[in-house]
Structures are given as structure tokens and as C-alpha cells.
Amino acid sequence: MRLNICIGGRAGQGINLVSGIVSGILTKHGYYTFNYRDYPSIIRGGHNFNILSISDEKIESHESRIDGLVAMDDLTIEIHKRELKKSGFIIPSDKYVEFGINLNIALAGALMKILGINKLILDEEIKNSVRKNPEESLKAADFGFDSVEKKFTLPKLNNRLQILSGSDGVIQGAINSKLDVYIGYPMTPATPVLTGLASTQEKYGHLVFQPEGEIAVANMALAASFAGARTIIGTSSGGFDLMTEALSLQGQSEIPLVAYLAQRSGPATGLPTYTMQGDLDIALRAGHGEFPRIVIAPGTPVEAIEKTNEAFYLSEKFRVLSIILSDKHLAESEFSLTETPKKPLEVKITRPVPGEKILKATSYEHDEFGNSTESAELTTRNGLARLRKYSEIKKACEKFEMIKLHGNLKSKNLIVAWGSTAGAIKDAIKNLDVKFLQVIYIKPISDQIKSEIKKSNKVLLIEQNLTGQLGRLIREKTGISIKQKVLKFDGRPFTSDTLREQIKKEFKLK
Amino acid sequence: MTEVSKTEINKKLNTDYKITWCPGCPNFRILESAKVVLSNLMKQGYKQENFAMACGIGCHGKIFDYLNISGFYGLHGRTIPTAIGLKLGNPNLNVIAFAGDGDTYSEGVEHFVSAGKHNANVALFVHDNQSFSLTTGQPTPTSEKGFKNKIDYSGAKLTNPINPLMLALSSGITFIARANARDVQGTAKIMEAAIKHKGFAFVEIIQDCIVFNIPINNRDKDMYYLKKIPATKDETIKLMQEYDYNINDGKIALGIFWKEERLTLEDQFPQLQNMIKNKIIGWKNLKR
């Protein structure tokens, strides 16, 4: 059983509350949900929509064809009607306009009735999620509920689930690592981590600071880390560009730093609120000079929890830059959490810090005391030491899950992909003769990628970008060029039903 | 403060690093002033290992190698965020920042105008020689009108210098002072007041460049010390405007132009108070 409900309206009408109430109820009811949020860069007006996908088995994506349309305005019907299945239903807003700001609640009530959910459960959820005037909201919900007929029956299931976004995963991972300081400057889609960690400062005791820009963020963070704080910074594509010189400073000063990079659609301002995997190249190489770093791309919120912790651990252990590479689709989509994340590794600072003794950190080439040097001999020695770190880091990373294999593990048809596309791919290949290799550590990269490709007859690269950046990296590292590609670069994430057809076509599967 | 003569400089502050400033450069004097202040503060009970400096890139930045205290020799223009970062990592460090005029008023001006707003407890010393000298003579925002340089051979007729003191005042910086690099004791006295100020303290140090900007040199005859901190903002502004950083333009007042107390950045975070109160050496040593 799988249903996709599109909830649409103008920005500010509260569509997130509708999907929030409905997914909240369904989660408690034991159903898996996946909520995709599509919104333009507008505060009020325009057209926003969520696709809430519901299933009795695990899902991590939404589909292109919808079973129901909850329309807060006429434009929603106009835009999404063509995606509606023949048997699909529409809940238009006309009947409920009298409820004003509670229009969304009335529509949520109607949707719950259609899905066959008990009214008492609905009322309870509203009491829990609406703080201001819950009586008015309850009235609207009841009216909505009574205004339509039941269409589906969703019996209660025994799954114990919880809803989590990719941003929540990074937040949890940072808290599990006992972060001390988060420094960030607002930029979609990295902002939820900034605000999420800011709102939990009191509870956990960490510190969040928003300075005058990304350049200040990165330089400040290195100094805070040098002074002994477990430090993480966060930004999106353009903000990351601004941090570039400071990343190079990390390479010279060897001060531990974790950076969260949530990609959006570029170049430049691009599509500020849409997704893309266009920044793998800059994550791998941003910053002048040559120095080691770690780039990890989680594909799910649970992976975001675990990999953020690994990023902290590795960064402190090797005094390197660890980048957690996410994107708008992972950061802002809401998943059902099914697995329990692994027990976090302890991130212990053992290095001396200023205040304990006299210590110098520097952007110059330097001797072991931090004094500047222009010596050819020292420059060579320091370069070789940096080079050695690459292999030491790789050895340490091999203890972690650098890749994951999904689907039919015996299949000779191999998909290679990374990051937020993992969800749609996993859902698309259910019961197909396809194996999916999810690359999680992108730097260092696992040797298993080469052997898996060699074992396969057909290899398909799937990326959310124009040029296949992971494909290029694999060619650089293995000499293998993946010819078959499905690349999408319109800012919209893959939907699993459309992708399934594309995969079947590429592998010539029935 | 008690006067500390050169012979009383605490030897622990010296390094054996070879000094590469031009012979006769007033940076030697600024270094001496810094050592005088730190020696004096150490006499008053400040611990040497509790000092931390942030340095920018330029001639001034070389001070990093000549002063034996902790520090972060950061990027050009980023001295202020580096200094604030040190405070966020360990609010108990006594953070001093050495920066150049190019650093502070050109590349990193966004940090300078935000410094008053943040009001971190940091002392910033700007070595203002009104030119980019380590890059062999190009104009900075404080270069005087008519400055002949490698970019504008005719003299920079098009641009007027900015007045950093006025910029600091309008940015809400809570301690604003000006010093003369050639006067070691006078500069040291102002530096000490800046370090002891609770909040962001800015000291603009007028410094000759004896190689690339000769016309601005030897201005001592125009300089005079303020007898006290001006009582009103109007008076402060008037004094700041006496000199507009052009060559023959008014008297050059030295001393503290402005001082006010405002909550510091560190004081505004409840999560730092235990660390501050119990003198815990940064997050690393904080049990939480």
C-alpha cells in the first residue's frame, strides 16, 4: 500500500502544519511517511506544496503520481491536477474558507476522514500541535472531518517510528559528539541546523553564534577550535565559496574543523530553495594549496547522525577538515526513522590548548613551535607530513561504513550514486534485478567501488547534477569511466516511480 | 600604570627569532610597547600563558614571531574574527589583536564595523602606516590624498582617506583610542587601558612607513595628548575630526577618545559563565 498526497497553497497558509499533523498521526499509527517540501524563495504568496508519501512498508522517497490533492487555493488544483491518478481525490478549499487561519486544520480534518483515521486521534494530535486557540482549531478539524466520506482504511500497524529530517540528523550527530560551538550564517538549506542548534543551547550547553558573514564564520571557528572547542560550522553552496580561504588556513594550521555543507541549485544564487548535487567538486577541492580532508555524504537522517559523529571524531583525531555534504532534499525532507543509530564515538580533545601552555597556530609554513619559515627543507618536510596523513586517514576511515550496498546483492546490474538520491533509488529498485552501491565516504574513497564495478556487467551512474561529478572522481581514482548515466539537474529531486522506469530502461529490465 | 623601562621588560616575552622589519621601522617601537604592557600586566598577576594574540598579514603581523605568547597568525583581513573566535573557545584568554590598516579598513572592514556590535572583550591594535608596505607600496583606505604609489603614479587624487576613529564610533566600538608608535611609553599606557577595558577596545597606532610613504612621517610636532576622556559624544567627534588623515590637516590628538561600558559578547552567553567564574581553561577543560 502506498499513497501520495499533495498538499499545496500559498506560502504562509500553513501547509507544513497539515503535513505535520497528518504524518504525526500516521507515524503513531505505525505507517511510514516521507514528506517532500517544495517551496519558492517567497515568504508570503506564491505556490508551495508538500508531497506526503504514506506506506505500510519502509519508504524514503515520494512519487510523481498523486492519490490525493489537498488544495488551499485554486492554483494548487490547476498545477497538480495532471499528476492526479484517475482514482484520485481532491479536497478543495471552498467549503472551509470561513475558518480563516484554521483553513489548513479543516483540510487536515477532511484528509484524516478520507484516510479512515479515528476522529479522537485527530483531536488529540491537534491539541498537541496547536498552541494558540486550540478550541478554534478543533472546531475546524471536526467540520473538515464531517464534510467528506471515508475512502481508505488504514489499520493500526505495530511499527514504532519517529520523524526526522536530514537537518535533524546533523543536529543529533553534533549533539552526540558533544559539540561546544556552532558558528553559522543563515543560508537555505543549511539554516535549519543553525536554528535547531540555537534552540537547544540551553538544554545541552553548547554555544551558537551568528557573526557578520561566512568569512567571519570560518575564521572564528578555527580560532575557537584552536582554543579547545569542538567546533562545527554550517553553510550552503555560495557561503561555502566564501569560506574557501579559511579552509586552506585549516590545511596549514591543522586545527580540527567540521563543516556542514548543504548544497542547493547553482551556479550563483541559482534556485535558492531547490536541490542539487553540484558542489561535490568544491567540497573535495576548495582552498588553495594541497592538504588532506574528509568528505562524507550521508543519504538518510540516520546516516547524518552517524556520519556527523564520525566527522567530529576524525577531524579531532587527525586535525583535519571534515565536510558533511548534504543538500536541500536530504536537509528538508522528513523521513520515518526506522533504525537506531550506532552508539556515538567519543570525541576527545587531547591536544594542548592556549592557556595550558604557550601555543602558536599559523597560516604561514612553520616549524614545530609555530614559528614562520620560508625554508625549503621545512616546506618539503611539512608537505610530506601532510601527504602521509592522507593514507593514515584512509586507514582510519576503513573502520567505518564508507559505502553501502542495497537491493539484489547478486545482481550484475549496478547503480552507483551518493547523497540524497539514495532514498529514491532504494525505493525504485525494490524487486528489480539491480544492486545499488551508495558511496558515503567520497574522500577518502573506498577501494570496494572499483571491485564492485568490475564484478558488474552494467553500471549506471545516477546523480543530481549536470556533469556527473562522482563519475569523474571514480574515473580519476580507478581509471573506470561509467558511460551510462541518469543525471537530473532541474532542482527537483528524483521521484521513485519515474526513476524506476528510467532504471528499467537503462538496464533493459521488464 | 607603573612605568616599565626597556631594561625591565620580562625576558620571558622575548623570542630568538630574527627580526626582519626594515631597520628603523616604528614596528620595533610597537613591539617594545607591547612587551612593556605585557611585562607590566604580568607584574600585576596576569599569567603569560593566558595571553593570546591574533595577527593579520602585513608588516605588522611579523610581531607574531617576536612575542612569546600564544597566538593565531591568521589570514589577511581576518584578525578580528580570529580574535573573537579565541574568546568563544576560551573566554578566559586575554586576547590582543595586531592588525594593519589594510587588514582592518580594507580587506576586513566588515569585521571592524561589526566589532562594536559584538563587543567581545578583545583589544585591537592597528598599526596604521597608511600604505600597503609588505607588498611594496600600494594605497590603503587611510592613505593620504596625493599619496604617490605604484598604482597611482600621479598621487591618489581621486580618493580621500577614511577616518578610522569616526568609523569606530559610528560602529559602536566601546573603547576608541589613538597612539603614536614612536612614543613607546605613551603607546604602552594606552594599550594597557585597552586591554583592561571590558569590551572591544580599538587603538589606532599612527606609524611611519619609512620606505613607502615618506610624506606622512615625522608628524610628532602636530600631535598632542588628550588630558582626559572627552565628556560628551559631540566633543569626541570634534576631536576625531581635527585630523582627517591627509598630510597637513589639523592637530593629531592622542589618547582615549571614547569609552563606554556595555555587556560583552562573552557575558551574554549563560553557557560561558561557569567557565569564566571558575577560570576553566576553555571548553576542553569544562565538564558538562
Image (spheres, coloured by chain):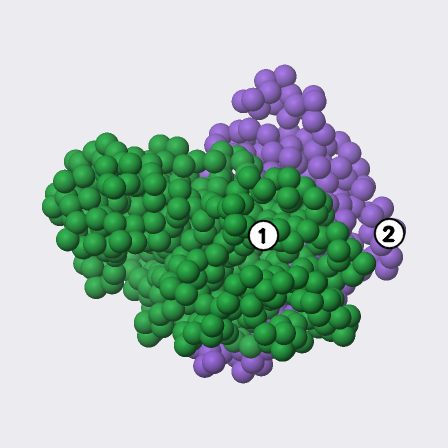
Chain colours: A green, B purple
From where the camera sits, is residue B245 visible? yes
Q: Which residue is mark 2?
A: B235
Classify the position of the C terminus of chain A by image quarter: top left
Dot label at residue A89 = 1
Q: Cβ–Cβ below 8 Å for labels 1 and 2?
A: no
Q: CA distance from mark 1 to mark 2?
A: 74 Å
Under mark 1, the amino acid is Phe
Q: Which residue does the image show at 41% across and 77% down from the upper left? A: A158
The percent position of residue A323, horizontal first and vertical second, equals 38, 53
| Pick the front one: B271 or A475 | A475
Q: Which residue does the image show at 44% across and 65% down from the upper left? A: A32
Under mark 2, the amino acid is Glu
In which chain is the residue bearing label 1?
A
Q: Is residue A438 above or below residue B58?
A: below
The percent position of residue A223, horizontal first and vertical second, equals 47, 58
From where the camera sits, is residue B176 visible? no
| Pick the front one: A200 or A289 | A200
Total labels drawn: 2
The percent position of residue A157, horizontal first and vertical second, equals 43, 74
Classify the position of the N terminus of chain A by image quarter: bottom left
Q: Which residue does the image show at 43% across and 46% down from the upper left? A: A495
| Pick the front one: A419 or B210 | A419
